[in-house]
Image (cartoon, rainbow, N blue to C red):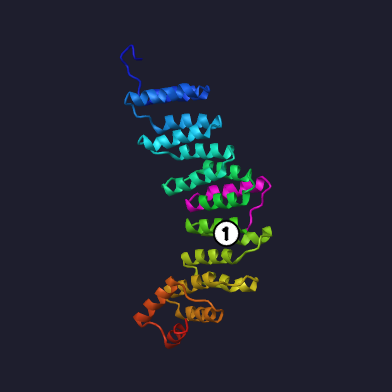
């Protein structure tokens, strides 16, 4: 190429580095990287990933971390793949704290972990006896970033591996489904838990009530709110405030007054957002004396 006055570009160098890394010639690949930097060619993240992956496969995590750090130092940005590679390397080296540290850094930097990243972290943490934490982290992370269907797949994979999800996993899923507008699926999962022998807790009910309220299904939400204690699950401050806020926003003052009265009797207080709605209603003079008298007790 050089003899014919055709200069290799970053893609050409990337192919060369990748090929050398696949053959295990990591020192030669490192030499090419240093040479192209000296020539003024800016390596892309793909070149760094190839080199970093080979160091991880050789369990040379200190060298892999140097390559990872140089990505930012040289003006590049690590990709999801970059983070997944080094997280996987640390997990295989059983340096889980380093893997979790990078996972947190990744999300702080605005990168959304994919299924591969979560799977890698789950595998690493489970091998060090921290499987419950890993499962909850993965389910929560997938739902938080809108990957609800992947989270459902993750739960099914757990079951296929003989690991039965608990109520914490299901609560995370139901919340995620409601957040992305999949109320019907969330509701179906909520009611299916009883058949599975999984008992709802106060967070299950509160999450489902919140989802129903979000879709304007106030009557159904109120029925579920009443059903909680019938099913032996005591209401808490969060569930009470969730129900009261929706009643107030829908101008259902009668139901809101009844729920407020019950909440006061149970020793709970209005939270900041509930109190703000109450203040707005009082200032609008659209409530009755009974409501005003009750508010004075809060």
Q: Secondary structure at mark 1?
A: helix
> At x 69% / y 60%, what residue is drawn?
197
- In x, y percent, where is residue 153? 58, 47
Whether 60 is among the magenta residues is: no
Q: Where 44 falls versus 168 (above or below)?
A: above
Asked whether residue 250 is in view, the answer is no
Picture coordinates of residue 261 (x, y %)?
Answer: 51, 82
Of 105 and 15, nearer the camera is 105
Q: Which residue is mark 1?
A: 171
User: On screen, 140 above or below 203?
Assistant: above
Q: Which residues are magenta?
A: 143-166
Question: Could you tell me residue 204's position as x and y percent?
Answer: 58, 63
Quadrant location of the N terminus?
top left
Q: Residue at x 60, y 42 (%)?
A: 123
**Residue 163 shown in magenta:** yes
Tell me if residue 56 comes above or below residue 230 in the rendering: above
Mark yes or no: residue 249 visible.
Answer: yes
Identify the residue at horizontal 43%, vertical 29% (top origin).
47
């Amino acid at each position: 190429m050089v003899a014919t006055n055709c200069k290799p570009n970053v893609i050409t160098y990337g192919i060369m580095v990748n090929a050398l890394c696949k053959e295990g010639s990591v020192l030669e690949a490192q030499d090419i990287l240093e040479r192209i930097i000296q020539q003024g060619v800016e390596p892309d993240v793909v070149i760094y990933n190839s080199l970093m992956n080979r160091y991880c496969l050789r369990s040379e995590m200190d060298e892999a971390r140097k390559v990872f750090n140089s990505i930012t130092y040289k003006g590049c940005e690590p990709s999801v793949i970059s983070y997944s590679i080094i997280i996987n390397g640390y997990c295989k080296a059983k340096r889980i704290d380093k893997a979790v540290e990078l996972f947190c850094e990744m999300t702080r930097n605005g990168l959304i972990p994919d299924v591969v990243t979560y799977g890698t972290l789950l595998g690493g943490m489970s091998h060090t006896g921290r499987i419950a934490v890993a499962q909850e982290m993965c389910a929560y992370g997938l739902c938080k970033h809108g990957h609800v269907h992947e989270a459902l797949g993750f739960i099914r994979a757990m079951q296929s591996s003989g690991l039965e999800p608990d109520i914490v996993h299901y609560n995370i899923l139901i919340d995620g489904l409601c957040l992305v507008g999949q109320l019907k699926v969330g509701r179906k999962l909520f009611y299916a838990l009883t058949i599975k022998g999984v008992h709802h807790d106060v967070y299950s009910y509160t999450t489902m009530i919140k989802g129903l309220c979000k879709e304007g299904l106030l009557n159904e939400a109120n029925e579920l709110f009443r059903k909680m204690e019938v099913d032996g699950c005591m209401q808490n401050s969060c569930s009470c405030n969730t129900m009261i806020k929706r009643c107030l926003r829908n101008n259902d003052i009668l139901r809101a007054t009844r729920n407020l009265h019950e909440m006061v009797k149970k020793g709970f207080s209005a939270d900041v957002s509930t109190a703000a709605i109450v203040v707005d209603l009082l200032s609008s003079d659209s409530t009755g004396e009974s409501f005003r008298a009750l508010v004075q007790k809060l």
